[in-house]
Amino acid sequence: MKSYLDGVSRYPEFLKNIYEGEKLKDPSFSYRVFARKLGVSHGYLANIIKGARPASKKFILDTAKILDLNDEELNPFLS
């Protein structure tokens, strides 16, 4: 996850980096697959990544656990 955090100041950017990185590794990777992993709908995830919907603190905390972010990695997204 560290490489996906490089130069990122907003949580949606971080999620977009993960999505794009995984998509390069596996062309079949999709918002549906990523959303399933995060426990949200693909539409909700797509709206957050595209900036159409803000990422709530609960969403950030819940998905950060799934993505195994430590407090140091997570704190910049909560301020």
Image: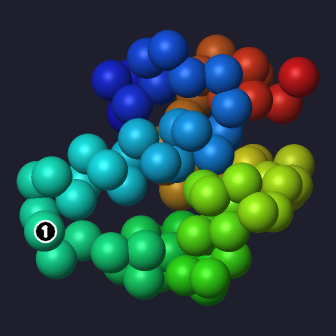
Q: Is residue 3 above or below residue 28?
A: above
Residue 65 at x, y = what percent? 60, 50
Q: In this view, does 59 lie above or below 3?
A: below
The residue shown at (33%, 75%) is 30
The residue shown at (43%, 17%) is 6
Neighbor class of circle 1 (other Cα within 10 Å; few <14, some 14-19, many 20+) is few
Quadrant location of residue 40?
A: bottom right
Residue 7 at x, y = what percent? 50, 15
The quadrant of the rendering that contains the C terminus is top right
Relative horizontal placement of residue 15, taking residue 55 as reference (left or right) = left
Relative horizontal placement of residue 52, taking residue 36 as reference (left or right) = right
- Tag 1 secondary structure: loop
Relative horizontal placement of residue 5, taking residue 65 as reference (left or right) = left
Quadrant location of residue 75?
A: top right
Residue 71 seen: no
Residue 2 at x, y = what percent? 38, 23
The residue shown at (22%, 59%) is 23
Report which residue position mark 1 lands on: 27
- Closer to the camera in the image, 62 or 27: 27
Q: How many marks?
A: 1
Disc 1 marks a residue whose amino acid type is Pro
Residue 13 seen: yes
Q: Is residue 10 above or below residue 62?
A: above
The quadrant of the rendering that contains the N terminus is top left
Colour scheme of the rendered structure: rainbow
Residue 16 at x, y = what percent? 47, 48
Relative horizontal placement of residue 21, taking residue 4 as reference (left or right) = left
The residue shown at (83%, 30%) is 78
